[in-house]
Amino acid sequence: MNTFTDRWRELDWHHITLAINSKRAHDVERALASARPTAEDMMALLSPAAAEYLEPMAQKAQRLTRQRFGNVVGLYVPLYLSNLCANDCTYCGFSMSNRIRRKTLDAREIVRECDALREMGFQHLLLVTGEHQSKVGMDYFREHLPAIRARFSSLHMEVQPLAQEEYAELKTLGLDGVLVYQETYHEATYARHHLRGNKQDFFWRLETPDRLGRAGIDKIGLGSLTGLSDSWRTDCFMVAEHLLWLQKRYWQSRYSVAFPRLRPCAGGVEPASIMDERQLVQAICAFRLLSPEVELTLSTRESPAFRDNVVPIAINNVSAFSKTQPGGYADNRTELEQFAPHDNRRPEQVAQALSQAGLQPVWKDWDSFLGRQI
Ligand code: SF4
């Protein structure tokens, strides 16, 4: 077996969905009692039967989180460099068929955005672009990454999937981590939501984390977009399988899992399955119980009240004051945005809420002298 595709081919969506839905109370209790839950246990933790066990799941998830990570919660912010995109995804405002104004930041505009973010205190940056290989591809990254990296202590990317050699090169320019969400692991559903462009290649995307692991990227972010497939439980289980596969093979890398749910956007679709807030908590706790060392992320897609209640349970990283349009921090316009965030509090308000919950907001936990040459 060389890539996760080999494992994915062994995983039958329909069979897994039935297995998850057939789990009973005793399966959940066994999973809760296990020091190291198996994939079968993960099915139980994600099952409808586990809804009755949310309180003990949350208590154990919180205990494991404090043991492994202490009270710290990292703050990061996305910087949208471009809304150009050569794909058509049914759920995204940047889709090429959407008639919106397109914008790619130049060097001067990038510096303005970086300065605005540094002013707010951010040190951890997530670079985001639409997927446009020719105009916002390796040449653009080569040109701009060094200047961005010089202003921040850690740099992650959420851009189009690249080749292994390209990730290796970006690592030498200061790239620390890459987030690449599969959106859904159900191939036919994936095809229905990705109508044009390179993103239609399900397997190129599915194997991206393998290429990241081989390129030695320090942190790899996984996730599915809840609402695309008709079973968030099965998609979450697939993410868990993906995580277990990667952790075994590319053990030098760290991993994070995020839980994005569909948000309103220009021309967007209605969710095919609804994950309510209790179910989102269930999924977060299930991942913590499965993997005490994985970092769990909660973005500003979720409401302030929900984030304040859930972050203390098991979350390691939160975004704050996110703008999902290029130029959003210096200009503060919303007409180019990818989707509408739900938590619009300023970073200092998010940090204050963390402190009030007994947590320690961390703006910086990494630097070049901590073992890395750039
Ligand atoms: S989800 Fe990504 S690839 Fe799809 S349209 Fe939006 S920016 Fe482009």
Image: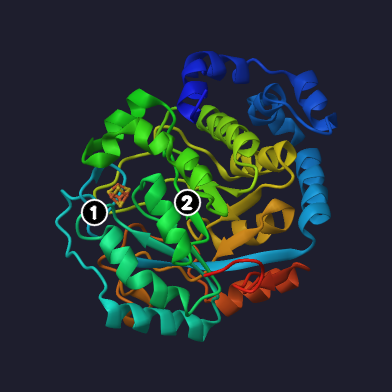
Residue beneath the point at 59% across and 49% down: 256
Q: Is residue 150 above or below residue 52?
A: below
Q: Quadrant of residue 227?
A: top left
Q: Nearer the viewer, residue 27 or 126?
A: 126
Residue 232 in the image, given as x and y percentages of width and height: 51, 32
When asked about the image quadrant of residue 57, the answer is top right
Residue 12 appears anywhere in the view = no
Residue 129, percent from left and from top = 33, 59
CA separation, marks 1 and 2?
Answer: 17 Å
| Of residues 369 and 103, the one drawn nearer to the viewer in this rendering | 369
Q: In this view of the protein, which residue sits in the foreground, 325 or 341?
A: 325
Whether residue 69 is visible here, answered yes or no, is: yes
Instruction: Label 2, secondary structure: give it.
Output: strand
Question: What residue sits right under mark 2 in the picture?
Answer: 179
Please indicate whether residue 221 sits to the left or right of residue 204 in the image.
Answer: right
- Check disc 1: other Cα within 10 Å, few if <14, some if 14-19, many if 20+: some
Label 2: few (<14), some (14–19) or many (≥20) C-alpha neighbours in 10 Å: many
Residue 227 in the figure: left or right of residue 72: left
Which numbered disc flags the more N-terminal residue, 1 or 2?
1
Residue type indicated by callout 2: Leu
Q: Position of residue 295 (x, y in %)?
A: 65, 51
Q: Which residue is mark 1?
A: 132
